[in-house]
Image (cartoon, rainbow, N blue to C red):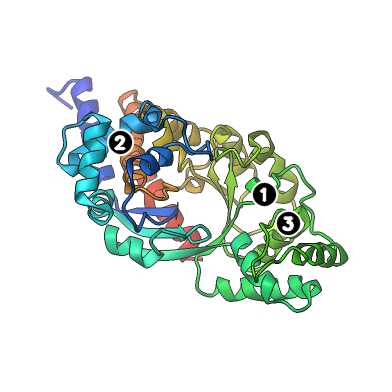
Amino acid sequence: MVGVSADASASGATAALREHVERLGLVDHHVHGTWTADADPVRLANALNEADTAPLADPRTAWDTQLGFAVRRWCAPLLDLEPHVAPEAYVARRAELGEEEVARRLLRPTNVDAWFVDTGWSTGLTSPDGLAALGGGTGHEVVRLETLAEQLLPTLDDPSSWAEAFGARVEEAARTSVGFKSVIAYRCGFAVDLAPPAPRAVAEAARRWHAGVVDGRAPRLDDPVLLVAGLYAALRTRRPLQLHVGFGDRDLDLAAVDPLLLTGLLRRDEVRGVPVMLLHCYPYERAAGYLAQAFEEVHLDVGLTTHFLGARGVGAVARSLELAPFHKVLYSSDAAGPAELHHLGARLWRNAVVSVLGGWVEQGEWSAGDAARVATMVGRDNARRVYLDA
């Protein structure tokens, strides 16, 4: 361009990309509801720590983290506070506004057009429709297999019929939900036999599990035979199957949730043509990217990762765009509880996408048009194709 330096042209391209990404209506393909009741300072601080399932010895330490700093930088202005305000002032203002008003202020700017809500963990959280009412867009349900199984078990007179009854429940759920989610990563990990279990083994496992029913409530499902049987019940519906992978709380064994352990499952005929959605992935996002290249069914996101890494989330977004074909990468927040997590999922993803893709445009590696197109694919179009257009 005559009279315009290369640096100025590149800067203009990045500004245009930023404007495009900011306007983009997202599809959050894996998320949970926001809190329905006001949170005290201790509850809020504990929600800023994903890994520790025990109450923090000193809740104030939660603020000295990448996530804590990100809350003060990006959420504070939406509550009429200065960026980087002290945690005590932030918590006080939050209490003054109340949970519903905080959620409304933080959710609306996410510019999310569709929320795909895992309802398996829903106590004290808004429903899909409730989340959409606060944040805009539409709410859709993702059914958690383990919760469905635990709800079914106490209703059975003959537990040996569990497989048939569960299959029927899954088929019924497939008619109204956008997909299924499994937390087999938490319950037993991936280093188990992932082949379809024999019917006799399933019946025996169901009888053992049913023996623990007390007061009409099922024990936590952690039998690998039944967990794996649940995966195949979901696969038969051909609906997208979400799998928690990598980072989570200490209930899981992080070494046993490397997605490479799923390779045998992904080679099976039952998986052919069924979208398998690897969630979160940290610190295994590169392994997930390899699987997305190797298997047509595999997709991935770095939800949860982006807001917990805060200013370092740029690296996770960049790594998710290394090996994986770009039509296999999706946006999600995996936010649950405080609306700060929903806001930061979107805010930090947009920041990271502009930084990563804009950097490649400035270096002459990518065109500005390709950068905008890939941002749209990841932020919206891939999820719509996989879940809504199937």
| Residue 287 visible to an observer of this rendering | yes
User: Alpha carbon of mark 1 to alpha carbon of mark 2: how far?
Assistant: 31 Å
Dot 1 falls on a residue whose secondary structure is helix
Outermost left residue: 3
Q: Horizontally, is 221 left or right of 279 in the view?
A: right
**Foreground: 81 or 257?**
81
User: Alpha carbon of mark 3 to alpha carbon of mark 1: how far?
Assistant: 11 Å
| Amino acid carrying mark 2 in the image | Val
**Foreground: 58 or 226?**
58
Number of the label disc, if any, that sits on residue 71: 2
Question: Residue 42, located in which quarter of the rendered image?
Answer: top left
Residue named by callout 3: 228
Q: Please name which of the two marks, 3 or 2, marks the residue nearer to the observer.
A: 2
Q: Please name which of the two marks, 3 or 1, marks the residue nearer to the observer.
A: 1
Outermost bottom residue: 157
Q: Are marks 3 and 1 in contact (CB under 8 Å)?
A: no
The residue at 21%/34% (across/down) is 89
Q: Residue 286, percent across and down?
A: 57, 33
